[in-house]
Amino acid sequence: MTGDVGGPGAPGTGGVRPGAGAGGSGMAGSGAAGLSAVFRPRAARWVSGTLAALVALGTALLLILLPGTGLSGYGVLDRLGFVLLGIGIVWFCWRQATVRAVPSDSGLRVRNLATTRTVDWASIVSIRFGQGRPWVQLDLADGDTLAVMGIQRADGDYADAEARRLATLVATRTRTPRDD
């Protein structure tokens, strides 16, 4: 996808409008159930999980192989510091592996690395995922923007299809009787 994914009322974004290319675009599932599936990154989950396992294993090996107490050894506080550092890195990797966006009838709940926020469908003005953007960005009615780390550029064509699915979902959820 070379441009931005337009959303309701997103003039001139130069990208795919919601609903455009919805059929046969490689999107997960079809119909309302497929549109409402949770948005999760693939590569970030795999890398974060692998890194967390390696850090946990490395921390355990480090504690076993460190020399004991004494002048040239490591004391209890040193070992506790290694454990706390390992736990911190594993927690960070877990948090990265669990980023997602969960659609519901009322809105989109976005869990990013540091924050979780729920936005109403009507608050989403446009969806951006042009070249150079690491993840989808929502432009909101209050002038704010919200990153959706659940759809990441590192996933390539899968991420493009997921961005189109999100744009289609927003268009479907914000449709009015007059369709304005």
Image: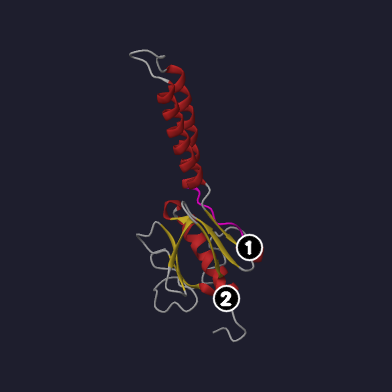
Dominant SS type (magenta): loop
Q: How is the image coloured?
A: secondary structure
Amino acid, disc 1: Ser
Q: Nearer the viewer, mark 1 or mark 2?
A: 2
Which dot marks residue 2?
A: none
Amino acid, disc 2: Thr
Q: Position of residue 140 (x, y in %)?
A: 46, 71
Q: Quadrant of residue 26?
A: bottom right
Q: First in sequence: mark 1 or mark 2?
A: 1
Q: Which residue is mark 2?
A: 174
Image quadrant where one finds the N terminus: bottom left
Residue in the image at 33% along x and 13% along y: 71
Q: Position of residue 175 (x, y in %)?
A: 59, 78
Residue in the image at 62% along x and 84% along y: 177
Image quadrant where one finds the C terminus: bottom right
Is 144 displayed left or right of 110 in the figure?
left
Q: Position of residue 14 (x, y in %)?
A: 39, 73
Q: Secondary structure at mark 2?
A: loop
Q: Position of residue 163 (x, y in %)?
A: 49, 63
Is 28 displayed left or right of 54 in the figure?
right
In the image, residue 39 lies in the stretch drawn in magenta = yes
Q: Which span is picked out in magenta? A: 36-43
Please determine whether, in this image, residue 108 is positioned above or below residue 53: below
Mark pair 1, 2: CA separation: 19 Å
Disc 2 crowd rating (10 Å Cα; few below 14, some 14-19, many 20+) is: some
